[in-house]
């Protein structure tokens, strides 16, 4: 089924719902929250600019976001933090990219 998402805002909303579902009880520093939201926003912009906004593309983006969030959790634990910091986000990106984790990187 190839359903087009109606807008970048709808795709972003769906990815933020994925984030909230996985990380609802997590604590983020202000900068790490912004970095996480920017990674999602940049991913949505990549999807739109590549014309990849179908339902299947959204499913792939959600799967990649889950991998990214899992990598952030591993970084947080590796660094001995109880909350997410900027270096957990950058460490997760470094750990996933390359190879590409479309559309996050």
Image (tube, helix red, strand yellow):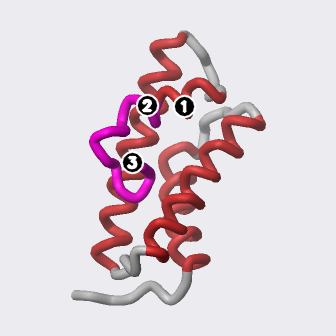
Q: Which mark is residue 94?
A: 2
Q: Residues within 10 Å of mark 3 (few under 14, many from 20)?
A: some
Residue 63 vertical placement versus 27 (above, below): below
- Circles 2 and 1: CB atoms closer than 8 Å: yes
Q: Quadrant of residue 58?
A: bottom left
Q: Which residue does the image show at 48% across and 47% down from the upper left?
A: 22
| Element carrying mark 2 | helix
Question: Residue at label 1?
Answer: 90
Sequence-wise, which precedes: disc 2 or disc 3?
3
| Element carrying mark 3 | helix
Q: Residues within 10 Å of mark 2 (few under 14, many from 20)?
A: few
| Element carrying mark 1 | helix
Q: Left or right? Give the position of 98 relative to 31.
A: left
Q: Which residue does the image show at 28% across and 41% down from the upper left?
A: 99
Q: Left or right? Give the position of 35 relative to 77.
A: right
Residue 95 vertical placement versus 63 (above, below): above
8 inside magenta stretch: no
Q: Residue 77 appears at what percent x and percent y?
A: 48, 17
Magenta-tinted stretch:
92-105
Q: Quadrant of residue 1?
A: bottom left
Q: Residues within 10 Å of mark 1 (few under 14, many from 20)?
A: some
Q: Which mark is residue 66?
A: 3
Comparing marks 1 and 3, which lies closer to the viewer?
1
């Amino acid at each position: 089924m190839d359903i087009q998402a109606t807008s970048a805002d709808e795709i972003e909303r769906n990815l933020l719902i994925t984030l909230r579902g996985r990380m609802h009880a997590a604590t983020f520093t202000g900068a790490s929250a912004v970095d996480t939201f920017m990674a999602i926003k940049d991913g949505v912009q990549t999807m739109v600019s590549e014309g990849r906004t179908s339902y299947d593309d959204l499913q792939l983006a959600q799967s990649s976001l889950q991998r990214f969030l899992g990598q952030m959790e591993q970084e947080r634990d590796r660094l001995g933090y109880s909350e997410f910091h900027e270096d957990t986000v950058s460490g997760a990106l470094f750990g996933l990219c390359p190879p590409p984790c479309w559309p996050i990187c």
